[in-house]
Image (spheres, rainbow, N blue to C red):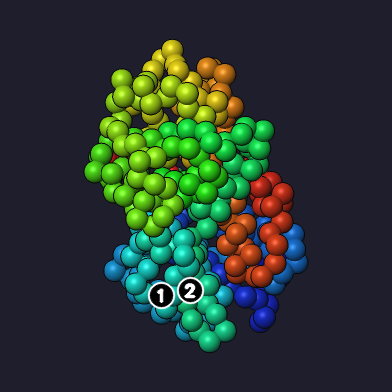
Amino acid sequence: MGVSMINGETAVVGLFGFPVSHSLSPVMQNAGFRETGLNYCYVPFPVREEDLSAAVRSIGALNLRGVNVTAPHKEAVCPLLHRLSGEALFLGAVNTVVRGEGGELVGYNTDVEGFSYLLQQNLAGVDLQGARAVLLGAGGAARAVALSLSRTGVSSLAIANRTVSKAEALASLLAERGALDREKAEVLPLERERLEAALQGTGLLINALSADPWELGCLPRGGPFPLAAIDLRYAPSRLPFLEWAQGGGAAGANGLDMLLGQGAAAFTLFTGEEAPAAEMKRALLEAL
Ligand code: NAP
């Protein structure tokens, strides 16, 4: 169902964030609705921080089926909802809100599923069971990655961050919630010597920083290199971090499949139908 087909029965879903003009979610979700023939339409809503609670109330007032939530509202939206999924509670962040039959607003976080999808699509041939992982970053995306990794059975996880206290808080959160024993998590600053040591024998290295670790100068030029490297960013097309890792023989993937995986999971929460992932990915690639 494309925009030209909107009629009196069209179900509206959308995105709350600020800004939203850069978001690829409208292109991805509307391609999914078109492909499946579902009478849905996905609309970006630029919502300022001071307007978030009015916007959340409008979900019922405007009969929206649900919304995705992006920066800067992922945390602030939590107390405005009736109920949170286990993952949203764990992460303290919501990226998808669904309005139930009785008007109940339920918050989900599909980023964990998104990262698991990225692993399946790109690293199915790399055995991560019992592998050691190094995670660069301790922000919202890193928290979702850490939870996903704790479920893949990694043997240990080193979390490196500029603000070390945030990495410490993430390691403690994983332990408190029973996701990863505290002794299996190591915390370190984002410094080249420390990363050089942490990378010895590492299976998987993930960049969840909003900057490029290679450009920050915190990676050892000559290795050691991980078996596989993932950069959660999907633009620009040239990612020096991935070039460094691939130059050292690592398998590599950018974050596009995480975006797709979290979007496909949201599509299913909105519609109850399986998402047409291939078509949604085609739309993303065209838009990039
Ligand atoms: P965030 O919560 O703001 O976290 C940003 C992280 O980057 C923090 O660890 C921060 O360290 C670090 N950082 C930022 N600037 C830095 C600098 N100059 N030097 C060193 N460290 C720096 O952001 P986020 O939501 O986690 O997003 C992180 C990245 O993941 C972004 O590039 C985003 O586009 C990407 N992402 C991708 C997907 C996907 O679907 N593929 C989903 C979510 C996010 P401090 O804690 O020290 O500030």
Question: x, y percentage for residue 170?
Answer: 33, 48
Identify which residue, 214 or 124, lies in the foreground: 124
* Disc 1 target residue: 81
Amino acid type indicated by mark 1? Leu
SS of the residue under disc 1: loop
Identify which residue, 128 or 88, lies in the foreground: 128
What's the residue at 57%, 19% (across, down)? 249
Residue 106's disc number? 2
Question: x, y percentage for residue 49?
Answer: 31, 65
Quarter of the picture holding the C terminus? top right
Callout 2: 10 Å neighbours few (<14), some, many (20+)? many
Image quadrant of ligand 1? top left
Callout 1: 10 Å neighbours few (<14), some, many (20+)? some
Identify which residue, 53 or 153, lies in the foreground: 153
Question: x, y percentage for residue 48?
Answer: 34, 64
Q: Is residue 173 above or below residue 82?
A: above
Q: Mark 1 and 2 residues: CB-CB less than 8 Å, in contact?
A: yes
Side of 104 relative to 125 (left or right): left
- Which residue is situated farthest in the top direction here? 222
Side of 160 relative to 36 (left or right): left
Side of 166 relative to 44 (left or right): left
Identify which residue, 200 or 279, lies in the foreground: 200
Q: Is residue 90 above or below residue 141?
A: below
Respond yes or no on whether mark 2 lies under 8 Å from ligand 1: no
Amino acid type indicated by mark 2? Val
Quarter of the picture holding the N terminus? bottom right
